[in-house]
Image (spheres, rainbow, N blue to C red):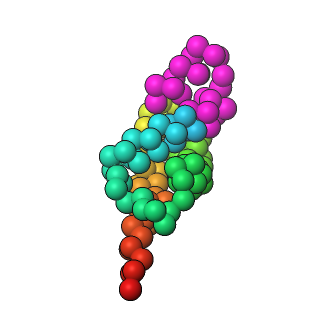
Amino acid sequence: MGILWIITHYANIHYALASPIAIELSIINNFIWNDRFTWHGRRSARQHSIWYGLLRFNLVSWIAGSMNWLLLIAFTEGLGLYYLWGNLLAIAIASALNFVLNEKWTFRSIPPVDSH
């Protein structure tokens, strides 16, 4: 929300164009914190590097991010809400989808390989 507001007000970029920039910056921030705390310890030697995890997280997050962007436009242009209120509602809805997709794919637990 803060990044969207800064880009919109200080860089004077329309909220619909500023939103994807804010979404990508929040995706990177969220990956760092989720990798460290939410799904910490799930990565095993069988999984790929942190960069591969970031790519997977980014792909999943852009599914929810696209939903967020479309809802922002719908709430702001369609319902006439102030863009920050529209974005807040869009975040609330898209976050649930984002969590489920990351839980099931990006940070899924991989059972250890049986050494027998």
* Above or below for 58 versus 2: below
* Above or below for 100 versus 87: below
- Determine whether, in the image, residue 109 is placed left or right of residue 46: left
Residue range in magenta is 1-22
Q: Is 30 in front, or is 18?
A: 30
Please give the name of the residue rendered at 53% of the width and 27% of the height, measured from the top-left corner: 4
Q: Residue furthest top?
A: 10
Q: Is 97 in front, or is 37?
A: 37
Query: Where is residue 107, by image quadrant?
Result: bottom left
- Determine whether, in the image, residue 3 is placed left or right of residue 109: right
Please give the name of the residue rendered at 39% of the width and 73% of the height, measured from the top-left corner: 112
Q: Is residue 105 visible?
A: no
Does residue 67 belong to the magenta stretch?
Answer: no
Query: Where is residue 78, by image quadrant?
Result: top right
* Above or below for 51 versus 83: below
Q: How many marks?
A: 0
**x and y percent of residue 16 in the render?**
64, 34
**x and y percent of residue 63 in the render?**
58, 55
Please give the name of the residue rendered at 51% of the width and 26% of the height, measured from the top-left corner: 3
Does residue 4 belong to the magenta stretch?
Answer: yes
Please give the name of the residue rendered at 37% of the width and 60% of the height, measured from the top-left corner: 42
**x and y percent of residue 10 in the render?**
58, 13
